[in-house]
Amino acid sequence: MNIAILGTGMVGRMIGVKLQELGHTVTLGTRNVANTLANENSDAYGNPPFKEWHKDHKELALATFKEAASDADLLFNCTGGMISLSVLEQVGEDVLHGKVLIDVANPLDFSGGMPPSLNPVNTDSLGEQLQQRFPKLKVVKTLNTMNAQLMVNPGLLEGMHHVFVCGNDAAAKDQAKEILNAFGWNPDQILDLGDITNARGTEMLLPIWLRLWGALGMAEFNFCIQRNG
Amino acid sequence: MNIAILGTGMVGRMIGVKLQELGHTVTLGTRNVANTLANENSDAYGNPPFKEWHKDHKELALATFKEAASDADLLFNCTGGMISLSVLEQVGEDVLHGKVLIDVANPLDFSGGMPPSLNPVNTDSLGEQLQQRFPKLKVVKTLNTMNAQLMVNPGLLEGMHHVFVCGNDAAAKDQAKEILNAFGWNPDQILDLGDITNARGTEMLLPIWLRLWGALGMAEFNFCIQRNG
């Protein structure tokens, strides 16, 4: 498949590389290609600038959000949650029409300092906002509740752990689950919660995720829903 | 110890019975003793009216919130989260001064219909509100992320699962952890997240908990934070 990753940060890079390894043709989308290539700064987590990273990953193309999405059979939203809506506006309703978007983003708002809050939250979610603004897009929320390494390599954790899926379109969710399987998620690790309103629940896992990151002193952990049988 | 349980619902009853079995003297607190004893209706979950339940549990006393708390060495908040502040106002600052309150409540707001939302949420929490309103009370938030059966009998689940603890007073948290141990929680099942602001993260687990309850078709599950080593 031709797959567009919206966003060139750590999450987009890791998912892009994994999809390319799986045989897909991957284009990373960005707001301004020249600016992305000119950037010489590492990000807040110490990840190298795109230019430097791209030297070792020339097989992944770089294009504008709109160009990347136009040629794609499947989209991943790996942008920062606070700008995701504006990114999809740049792609445009015509391009998004009928496509599946796997939404990995969380609406973390750092404007009030650390720890970030969620915006929207509680009675709304980013997943719902994307679906509502673009009703012909098929939004599937998943993978937003763990760090990027685990998203594409769940076997890094020895014990059982889960990935949540939600969305309004059953066929789109099936396609997302196939991708999850290819990433290494077994069917019994995938919990389908129902429609896109469940994005509230998964996005609201972020506050405790961030606190656990601090309390445990590492990011390589995930939620497991423990039950008998 | 003399322990007061604020609230006479299912959670308060189960914790009260467990504490009594463990050798403590337990008083359940309610707004109006006569009204609680006169009520003849089951609750929304089919639990019998207090009067009927109490026939088999005469060893647990019933008193007003203030009376129950006045004689207690330790308090449990098992009231509905939307009324917890007003309940503590009835108990009063003088009675609460210096006491430890184990806060099991969640601020679920059903006024907008189902599913309930959280109020407060995101940048505040019920645990923090109780602590802020009564600074001399030592609030420990715990046990609010699972159903009542698991709170007092974590061995019902075969695999690993966790209970979160947070609060500003280290000695109060130690006391809460001793109670958790007595309930059956092993030390490695208890995750201390830090200060009371972490109540935001644990209360914000409720939306996905409620959705999982629906998706799994049963309430006997709990969060496990899966990690290696």
Image (tube, coloured by chain):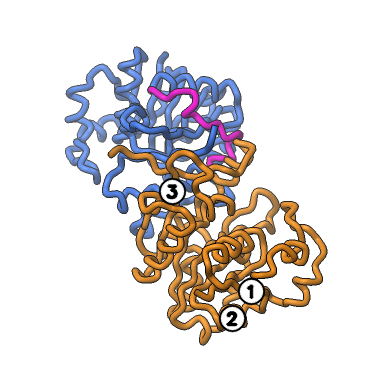
Chain colours: A blue, B orange
**Residue B62 coordinates in the image, percent (x, y):** 67, 74
**Residue that extends furthest to the bottom in the rendered view of this protein:** B94
Q: Nearer the viewer, mark 2 or mark 3?
A: 3
Q: Could you tell which of marks 2 and 3 lies nearer the N-terminus?
A: 2
Which image quarter holds the C terminus of chain A? top right
Q: CA distance from mark 2 to mark 1?
A: 10 Å
Q: Amino acid at mark 3?
A: His
Residue numbers of the magenta segment:
A184-199
The residue that appears at 37% across and 66% down in the rendered structure is B174
Q: Amino acid at mark 2?
A: Val
Q: CB atoms at circles 2 and 1 under 8 Å apart?
A: yes
Residue A170 magenta-highlighted: no
Q: Which residue is mark 3?
A: B162
Q: Nearer the viewer, residue A72 or B64?
A: B64
Instruction: Check residue B91 in the rendering and tell me which mark sits there, or answer none.
Output: 2
Q: Chain of mark 1?
A: B
Residue A185 magenta-highlighted: yes
